[in-house]
Image: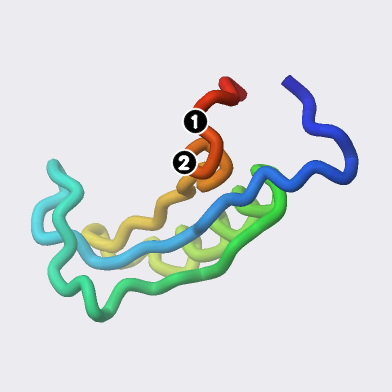
């Protein structure tokens, strides 16, 4: 589904160092890196790629994109 030009599909990009790369359990929740909130997936993905590249030498560092718009309105399936 393509979003209307003025529709905001809010995404959060954040990351942190994991205890174990086979699980999503962070070493320290207080040190999570909140990259920001983005109005669409494309801009969130661009930010995610940038952070992933910055931290490529740390195998335990992971960044994620959260589709906040889906949490805010779970009735939408997009």
Across and down, in percent, residue 41 comes to: 65, 43
Q: Is residue 51 left or right of residue 78?
A: left
Q: Quadrant of the N terminus?
A: top right
Can you tell which mark lies on residue 71? 2
Q: Quadrant of residue 16?
A: bottom left
Describe the element under mark 2 as helix, strand or loop: helix
As drawn, the residue found furthest toward the left would be: 20
Residue at 50% across / 65% down in the picture? 51
Q: Are marks 1 and 2 in contact (CB under 8 Å)?
A: yes
Q: Is residue 52 left or right of residue 49?
A: left
Structural crowding at the residue carrying mark 1, measured as other residues with C-alpha within 10 Å and reported as few (<14), some (14–19) or many (≥20): few
Across and down, in percent, residue 35 comes to: 51, 69
Q: Quadrant of the C terminus?
A: top right
Residue at 41% across / 51% down in the picture? 64
Residue at 52% across / 56% down in the picture? 12
Relative to 58, does residue 72 appear above or below in the rendering? Answer: above
Relative to 14, does residue 42 appear above or below in the rendering? Answer: above
Q: CA distance from mark 1 to mark 2?
A: 5 Å
Count every numbered label the image shows and give the total: 2
Q: Is residue 18 left or right of residue 16?
A: left
Query: Which residue is at the front of the view, 40 or 20?
Result: 40
Can you tell which mark lies on residue 41? none
Relative to 57, does residue 39 appear above or below in the rendering? Answer: above
Across and down, in percent, residue 23 comes to: 14, 44
Query: Which residue is at the front of the view, 17 or 68?
Result: 68
Can you tell which mark lies on residue 74? 1
Describe the element under mark 1 as helix, strand or loop: loop
Residue at 40% across / 56% down in the picture? 63
Across and down, in percent, residue 45 comes to: 60, 48
């Amino acid at each position: 589904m393509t979003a209307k030009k003025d529709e905001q599909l809010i995404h959060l990009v954040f990351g942190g160092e994991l205890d174990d790369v086979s699980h999503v359990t962070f070493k320290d929740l207080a040190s999570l890196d909140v990259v920001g909130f983005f109005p669409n997936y494309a801009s969130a993905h661009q930010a995610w790629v940038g952070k992933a590249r910055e931290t490529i030498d740390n195998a335990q560092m992971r960044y994620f994109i959260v589709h906040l718009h889906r949490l805010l309105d779970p009735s939408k399936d997009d």
